[in-house]
Image: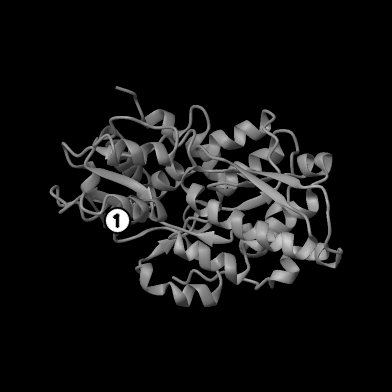
């Protein structure tokens, strides 16, 4: 399926907004805090550097962007509990919805403020195996075989883990014919999980550095980072079908209005849609949403059938209630050893 979903090109001048009309000169420096999820650390190091350069050129003002990373759900909880994020760039829309539901930190319609449902890049879920694939893991059904150690984080705290869980669930539902079969499949998969880290990066460390498990269920970009760093020790396997992951971004209204940082925070998120930022996104193995960047990086991302949360599950509200709320399906099927 096409990854292009209502993308609207935002030129750099528009990304910087009305601030470009300000006269360059000495202005007090401004600081932003981007509260993000685990695998985006390297991406935002480059994004922040590039945005700061352009903001300075357009306004004469220095901007310092600090980063905070962890499991997406855990990060959302930190903002609700008082972490002073100017923007959030989390792993799934449900975690940002929680900011509205728990304290009205941002508007209910936050996803309508930016193109592509406020997702400036997409990704998917793949499988990382040991070099040479000694356990012959080719698809989701191999993850439930006896003796296969599966590394995946905790869907109670990690957005990536929820994508992993849902990708496996929908694949099984389609292959085996129903919800009961999908539930049984996912229960057997988690029966092969020896440890649940709180976030995707923690699971990456568990698999690649601590050498636990036979397969790591991973964000696509994290898989390529592992292949780049541990190329002689891991291989990436694409399953027969997976999920279209759409990590969204949003301004935290209550914080930026109190701190006076709304203009730069909004410009920062709009900048993610510029061609310069889309190129950085592709370089870091996220799937760009601009047509130009998609074409430039098309050889990097194998095509495979991708289903969406809306198509398969009816949206994040329904998923959160049924699967990840206390006492939900995940709690019912997963028993710690």
In the rendered image, which quarter contains the N terminus? bottom left
Q: Quadrant of residue 103?
A: top right
Q: Is residue 228 above or below residue 194?
A: below
Q: Is residue 68 left or right of residue 222?
A: right
Residue 163 percent location from the top left of the image: 44, 48
Residue 269 percent location from the top left of the image: 67, 57
Kind of element beneath mark 1? helix
Residue in the picture at 69% in, 73% down: 11
- Can residue 242 be seen at all in this image of the molecule? yes
Mark 1 Cα-neighbour bin, 10 Å: few <14, some 14–19, many ≥20: few
Residue in the picture at 85% in, 67% down: 21
Question: How many numbered circles does the render carry?
Answer: 1
Q: How is the image coloured?
A: one colour
The residue that mark 1 highlights is 175
Residue 94 percent location from the top left of the image: 59, 44
Quick one: 315 or 52, which is closer to the camera? 52
Q: Is residue 115 above or below residue 34?
A: below
Q: Is residue 72 left or right of residue 108?
A: left
Q: Is residue 165 left or right of residue 145?
A: right
Q: Residue furthest front?
A: 26
Quick one: 253 or 39, which is closer to the camera? 39
Residue 131 percent location from the top left of the image: 18, 51
- Can residue 178 be seen at all in this image of the molecule? no
Q: Is residue 204 left or right of residue 281?
A: left
Q: Residue furthest top?
A: 337
In the rendered image, which quarter contains the C terminus? top left
Q: Is residue 317 above or below residue 19?
A: above
Residue in the picture at 72% in, 65% down: 15
Q: Quadrant of residue 77?
A: top right
């Amino acid at each position: 399926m096409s990854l292009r979903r209502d993308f609207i090109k935002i030129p750099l001048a528009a990304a910087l907004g009305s601030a470009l009309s300000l006269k360059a000169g000495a202005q007090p420096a401004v600081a932003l805090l981007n509260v993000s999820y685990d695998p985006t650390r390297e991406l935002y190091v480059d994004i922040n550097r590039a945005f700061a350069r352009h903001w300075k050129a357009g306004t004469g003002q220095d901007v310092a962007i600090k980063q905070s990373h962890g499991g997406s759900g855990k990060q959302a909880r930190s903002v609700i509990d008082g972490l002073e994020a100017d923007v959030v760039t989390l792993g799934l829309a449900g975690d940002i919805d929680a900011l509205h539901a728990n304290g009205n930190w941002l508007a209910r319609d936050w996803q309508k403020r930016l193109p592509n449902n406020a997702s400036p890049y997409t990704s998917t879920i793949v499988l990382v195996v040991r070099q040479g694939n000694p356990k012959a893991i080719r698809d989701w059904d191999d993850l439930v075989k006896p003796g296969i150690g599966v590394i995946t984080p905790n869907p109670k705290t990690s957005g990536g883990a929820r994508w992993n869980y849902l990708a496996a669930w929908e694949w099984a539902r389609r292959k085996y014919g129903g919800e009961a079969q999908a539930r049984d499949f996912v229960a057997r998969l988690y029966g092969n999980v020896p440890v649940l880290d709180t976030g995707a990066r923690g699971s990456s460390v568990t698999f690649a550095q601590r050498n636990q498990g036979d397969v790591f269920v991973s964000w696509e970009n994290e898989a390529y980072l592992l292949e780049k760093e541990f190329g002689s020790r891991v291989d990436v396997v694409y399953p027969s079908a997976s999920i279209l992951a759409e990590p969204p971004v949003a301004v935290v209204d209550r914080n930026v209005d109190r701190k006076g940082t709304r203009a730069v925070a909004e410009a920062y998120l709009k900048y993610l849609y510029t061609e310069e930022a889309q190129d950085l996104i592709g370089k870091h193995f996220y799937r760009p949403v601009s047509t130009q960047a998609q074409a430039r990086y098309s050889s990097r991302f194998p095509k495979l059938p991708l289903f969406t949360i809306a198509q398969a599950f009816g949206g994040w509200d329904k998923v959160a209630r049924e699967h990840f709320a206390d006492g939900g399906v995940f709690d019912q099927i997963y028993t710690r050893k």
